Amino acid sequence: MVTKDRVVAALGSRLSGEVDASERRRAEYSSDASNYRVPPRAVVFPRTDQDVAVALEFAENNGLSVTARGGGTSVAGNAIGPGLVLDFSRHMNAILELDAQARVARVQPGVVLSELQKAARPHGLRFGPDPSTQNRCTLGGMIGNNACGPRAVAWGRTSDTVRELRILDGTGVERTLAHDLSVLPGLAEFTRAHLAVLRTDLGRFERQASGYGLEHLLPERGSSVAKAFVGSEGTCGLLLDATVDLVPLPKAAVLTVLGYPDIATAADDVAAVMACKPTAVEGIDARLVDAVRAHRGTVPELPRGGGWLFVETTGDTPAEALAGAAQLRRSVDALDSRIVTDPAAAAALWHIRADGAGLAGRTPDGQPAWPGWEDAAVPPERLGAYLRDFADLTRAHGVDGLLYGHIGDGCIHVRLDLPIADAPQRFRRFLFDAAELVVRHGGSLSGEHGDGRARSELLALMYSRPVLDVFAGYKALFDPKEVLNAGVLVAPRPIDADLRLAGLPLLPAAGGFAFPHDNGDLSTAVHRCVGVGKCRADTSAAGGFMCPSYLATRDEKDSTRGRARVLQEVARGALPWSSAAVAESLELCLSCKACRSDCPAGVDVATYKAEALYRRYRHRPRPLDHYSLGWLPRWLAVATRLPRAANALADVSVLRRIGLRAAGIDPRREVPRLADRSFRRMWRDLGGVVPPQVRPHQPRGTVETTETQRPGADRPEVMLWIDTFTDAFDPEIALAAAQLVQSLGYRVRIPARRVCCGLTWISTGQLDGARARLRGTLDALAEHVRAGGIVVGLEPSCTAVLRSDLPELLPEDPRAAATAQAVRTLAEFLSEQPDWRPPQLAGRSVVVQPHCHHHATLGFAADRQLLATIGMNVTEVTGCCGLAGNFGMQLDHYDISVAVAEHGLLPALRAAEETTVFLADGFSCRTQAAQLAGRRSRHLAQFLLEQ
C-alpha cells in the first residue's frame, strides 16, 4: 500500500499546485455535508489541467481512487473518498469566457456559482439553476450532482444548461463531450444496444435524478454525451472546464405567498399553480417557519395556513409580473394569499426559505437532524399522497424533521433525526422502507443531491437488474479500472458503512465549559457541524461575520467546518488534544464567535478553542502570550498605578520591540496608551456622581433632570460594569455612559472593588482562572442583581462574557443565570427607557463597526434601531475588524489580522469622508482602526453625549 509520505514525495515535485497528506488536512477532507467519514490518503489542490492528469496517473498506477471536490457541500457523501481527493475550488476557479451575445460562459470546475452570477448580472444574464448553497457551491459540484434549486421549474436543471464539457476520463484521456457519441469508443454501440432500457426506465419525470441520466444519449434527446455526464457524481471523469448556457434575468418579479391547511394540501394544488407558468414554486411547512421565528425572533407576515407555497411570477414589466400573480391567485384553491411587489419585502420572505434550509439541521424539539433521506422526488401529481404516506412512515419509525422543498417539480427536502447510533438496525430499516415508499409512488430516491454513499445501495430497490447492469457498463466505458469515486453508484458501499456518527464515545465535560446546549457532551457539540459550508461563503452582504480567517486565506483549515472536522477526530479518539493537527487548525481562529450565530447549526468554535486549549495546557507550561495577554488585567492593574511611566517605556521603540517579542506579541504592533487616570480613580475622586462642572453641556439625547430627579439614595440604581479596557485606556467612555444614565434619573454604581469577567483567561483557555474571576464578579454583583438591578456593559466582549460564557462556565451557581439576565448593552438599556429622547441628526453620516461578540452573542438590533431613530445615514461594517482581542497582537498573526481588516473595516474607512463619525464600541475595533487607518473612533456613549 502506498503511504501518505510517498504520495507527497511523488506528487510534490510534479505539481504546480499542492499536495497535503497531513493528519489535519486528511481530517478536514474526511467528510462533506453528509453523514459519512472517509479519510483520504492525501488532498491535491490542482492548479492546471496537467496537475489533474498527473494526480490521476499516479492514482491509477498505485491503486488509489480519485474523488473530485468543489465546495464540499454534497449531502450524500459524493465528495469524499479513500484515495486522492482533488479540491478544484482553490486554484481552478476562473471564469474563462463570458459571451453575453451568445449567452454562454466557459468556466473551470472550481468557480463558485455566485461568482458566475455576479459576472453575468451586468449583462442582464444569469445561470439558471440556483441551489440554496450558491454562495459556496461550485459549478463542478453542480455538474456532478445535477443541481437544481427553486427555479428549475422555469430554467431547468444543470443538465439542461450544459453545452460542452472537457474532461479526463478514468484512463487519463482528455475528451470533449458534446452531442457526438463517437467521442468515446463503444458509446454509440452501447446506446444502440440498450435503447429499450433508456427509453422505458430513465427520464420518466423531471426530477428522476437517481442513477445515471442516460436518457440524454437517446437520438430523440439529441445524443448529448455532455448532458448524460451531468449527475455522474465524479464516477466517469474529472471535469476540466464546462461551457454552459445563461438565461436572461427577469425584468420584473412578483412573489405570491399561498397559505394552505398543511404542506400536503399545498402539494395537491400544484397543477393549478404550474398552469400559471411560475419561475419558482417552493413549499414550506409551518414547523419550519416556527423554527425560523424562534431563531430570528420574528418573521415577515404570512397568509393564514399551516403550509405555504412561495410562487414567483415574472414579466417584462412590473404590470405583467403582477398580472401573472393575480391570475395565480384566481386559479388556486388556497386558504389565503399575499402578493408582494416590493423587492425588499420579497427578499425578506425568501430568507425564511433560506434560513429554514440551515435550521432544518435541528428537529422541532432541538435534536440534531441529518441528511441521508433529504431530497426524494415523486411526480408532482403524486406529491400530496406521498407526503401523507411519508408522515405515516416517519411516525411509525419514530423519526422527525422539518419539511420544505421544490413543490413545483415534486422534490421534498427534509432532514431527520435518523437513528444513526442504532446503525445498522433501525437506520437501515428506515431507509429501505423510505425507498420502497418513494418507488411505490413512481419516484426517485434523489431529486437533485445525487445518490452518493447515502443512496447508491438503495438503487436496487428503484431499478431492475438490467438497468443496474446498464449503469455498470456505462461507467466501464469511461473508467474501466474503477479509479473514479469508487463505491458510488456502481458497486456501492453499504449505506451504513463509514458513518461519521456511529459508535462515537461520549466526551463529557472535564472542568471547562459545561456545554448545556449539547447535554454536557463536547462530542455532540463539535458534531453540530454537518458540513453545509456556510462558513466558506462571503455572507457580508447579508450582514454575516463568519468566518473571517477563511475569507482571508481561502483555506479549508481556517473555516469553521474545517476546524470542527479536526475536533471531531479528537472526539472519536483518532487525534489527541496535544496533536499538531489541533494546534494548526485552531491557530488562526479569531475567537470572534461569529459562527455561534451565523452557522445554521450553531457551531461555536471560539468556545471549542478555549476548551481545547484548556485540555491541552491544564497544569502544563503555556505559550508566553497566554501569560502576557491572557493575564493582561493583572498587568494593567499594576501599570495604571504609574501610567505615565508605563507609556514612556512603551515610547522607547527598542525596548518596545524587545519587550513585545519576549511576551509573544508581534513587534509591529503599537502599545495602546494608558489614560493618565483610570476610571475607577476618577470615580473615586468624583464621589460616585458626575457633577455639572465636568459635563461639557446638557446632552440632547436625554430627559431633563429636575431637582427631584437628581441622582440620590432614593433613586433606582444601575450598575455600570467597568471592564479592564475601559478603565485603563478609555475612562472617558465610562464617564459619558455614567452621565447618560444619571440624566435619566438613575443612580450609577460601579463594583466596589476591581473585578474582571475573565475574558482574556477564556480566550487563552485558562478556564480555571476565568471561573475564579467570574466567581468574584458574581460576589460583586449579587446584591445588586438580587434586588432587581440592571448591569450595563460598555465593552461588548466583556458584556458578552457576562451574558453567555458566565452561565456556561458556572452552571452550578444560581447567581450566574440571574446575572446574565440582568446584563444589558448601553443601546438595550436606552431602548427600555420610555422617557428617553434620542437626538435627531437626519442627514449626518456614520460608519459603525459592530464588535463580533456584539453581533454574535448580544445582538446588534438595539443599536441598529437606535441609529435608525436618530435618522443618520449609517454604513454598517460587516465582518471582524481583525484584531479580535489577543489574536491580532500575537506573534505571526499580524498579516492575517490586516487581511481580515481589509475585508470590511479598512475599505469602509477609506470610502468614508473625513467628517464621517466612526462608531466602535469594541476596544479591539477602535485600536485596529487607529493603528491601521489612523482613524479616531467614538463609543456610542460618547457620540450620544456630544450631540
Image (tube, rainbow, N blue to C red):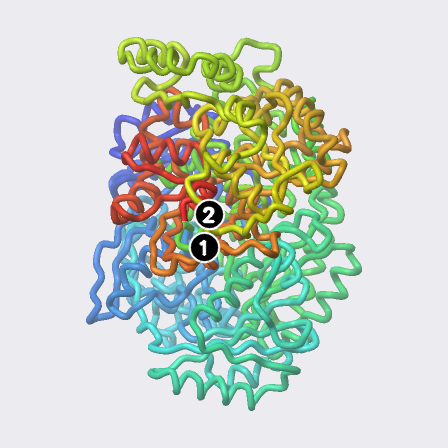
Among numbered discs 2 and 1, the one appearing first in the sequence = 2
Cα–Cα span, label 2 and label 1 = 9 Å
The 10 Å Cα crowd at callout 1, few under 14, some 14 to 19, many 20 or more, is some
Viewer-closest of 613 and 130: 613
514 shown above or below 197: above
245 shown above or below 135: below
- Examine the image and state in which quarter residue 651 appears: top left
414 shown above or below 53: below
In contact (CB < 8 Å): disc 2 and disc 1: yes
Residue 465, image x and y in percent? Answer: 58, 60
Give amino acid for label 2: Pro
Residue tagged 1: 839
The 10 Å Cα crowd at callout 2, few under 14, some 14 to 19, many 20 or more, is many
* Secondary structure at numbered mark 1: loop
Residue 687, image x and y in percent? Answer: 58, 27
Residue at (52% x, 19% y) in the render: 633
Give amino acid for label 1: Pro
Q: Is residue 38 visible?
A: no
Give the residue at the far right of this rendering: 396
Residue tagged 2: 699
* Secondary structure at numbered mark 2: loop
Residue 149, image x and y in percent? Answer: 47, 65
Viewer-closest of 30 and 730: 730
